[in-house]
Every structure is written in structure tokens, then in C-alpha cells.
Amino acid sequence: MILTFYGEGKGKTSIALGLALRASGYGKKILFCQFIKGDWKTGEDTALAKIKNLTHKKLGVGFVLPSDSKKQKKQHRDAGRNGLKYVEAEAKKYDLVILDEVLYAIKLGIFKTDGILSIIRKNKKMDFILTGRPKIKKIIAASDLVSEIKKIKHPFEIGKKAKRGIDY
């Protein structure tokens, strides 16, 4: 199955983490890949490292900003494309492949929708979870389950900073 979680609301990565936890409880082998997110330490990094049947990879160099230089944008593209090659080579070894923030990476032009769908088509025996903010029509059409995560209210809007253990 292909499960896609997209939208402006908070919780897409949290949903993917919950599904990884559930799959691990059944002895499934999980590949949890995060695009866009950098190498800073988060609570999920520590928790994921404790799950024996889960491989966690950060395949980006951090958030992509409109103010990034051409050199920085190239670093993002190179990291993302190398990450996609990694996923393509490794996916067949797993039961569940999670591509966190992959939809945002597609929107930014780091790689194309067809590249993701090609990997999924080649690995029909496993389940894929795709997350990110943008709605990618080809991904939606190919998915078996789609949930839009809608933002109603967020503490950032009133100047509150990210909270350890909740936001990272």
C-alpha cells in the first residue's frame, strides 16, 4: 500500500512515526528516511535508534530557504538525489519504507514525482508512507490511503517557539 499524509497541519511525521512503531511491534523491517531535515539531534532520532528492526536515515542537509544561495540549493539537490538513490538501492530489504518530507522535496525540484513512483512500482511487496506539505496530484492518484492534515491553529502564529519533545 501507499499511504500519503500531506497538508499544512502539524503531525505528518508523527503519524509516520506511529505507524513505524506499530509495524515494529509486528517484527516488520522499516526504513525511515527523512528528506529536507538536517543532522541536528531530535527526540525521534534517539527513540528510533532503540528500535532493532528500523533503519533511520537523514538524507537532506536541512531546511531549504528562499534566501539560500545557488551553491546551497545545489547541496540540497545533490543530497536529495543521493538519498533517492539510497532508497532505490535499499527499499527491497524492508517491509515498510517511510519517506518523510518527500512531497516537499518534489515541490522544490530536488527530484521528480516519477522517480518516487518508479521506486514504488519496483517494490510492490512493501508498504510506503509519504509525507510533506504539498499536494502532489500524481502521488495522490497512486496512493491507496490519503489524509490531508489541516492546520486550524498553531502556536508559532503567536510567536511561541518550537517545544522540545513536542515539535522536535
Image: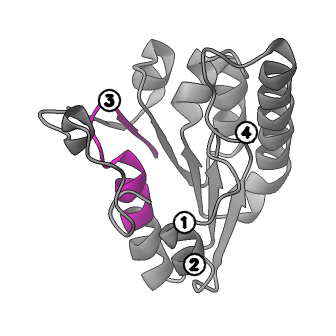
Q: Quadrant of the C terminus?
A: bottom left
Looking at the rendered structure, the kind of residue marked 4 is: Lys
- Residue sitting at x 61%, y 35%: 63
User: Is the Cβ of the residue at disc 4 closer than 8 Å to that at disc 1?
Assistant: no
Mark 2 or mark 3, whichever is nearer to me: 2
Q: Position of residue 85 (x, y in %)?
A: 85, 40
Q: Position of residue 53 (x, y in %)?
A: 63, 80
Decide: few, some or many residues near mark 3? Use Cα within 10 Å; few <14, some 14-19, many ≥20. some
Whether residue 6 appears in magenta in the rendering, the answer is: yes
**To which residue does mark 1 refer?**
42
- Of helix, strand and loop, which one carries label 1? loop
Which residue occupies the foreground of this view, 111 or 122?
Answer: 111
Q: Is residue 52 left or right of residue 168?
A: right
Magenta segment boundaries in residue numbering: 1-18
Residue 87 visible in the picture: yes
Looking at the rendered structure, the kind of residue marked 2 is: Thr
- Of helix, strand and loop, which one carries label 2? helix
The tag earlier along the polypeptide, 2 or 4, is: 2
Decide: few, some or many residues near mark 4? Use Cα within 10 Å; few <14, some 14-19, many ≥20. few
**To which residue does mark 2 refer?**
46
> Residue 7: which disc?
3
Residue 28 visible in the picture: no
Give how far apart the Cα atoms at labels 2 and 4 are: 31 Å
- Residue sitting at x 57%, y 78%: 46
Give the image's coloring scheme: one colour
User: Is the Cβ of the residue at disc 2 closer than 8 Å to that at disc 1?
Assistant: yes
Give how far apart the Cα atoms at labels 1 and 3 are: 22 Å
User: Is the Cβ of the residue at disc 1 closer than 8 Å to that at disc 3?
Assistant: no
The vertical placement of 88 against 68, above or below, is: below
The tag earlier along the polypeptide, 4 or 1, is: 1
**To which residue does mark 4 refer?**
122
Give how far apart the Cα atoms at labels 2 and 3 are: 26 Å
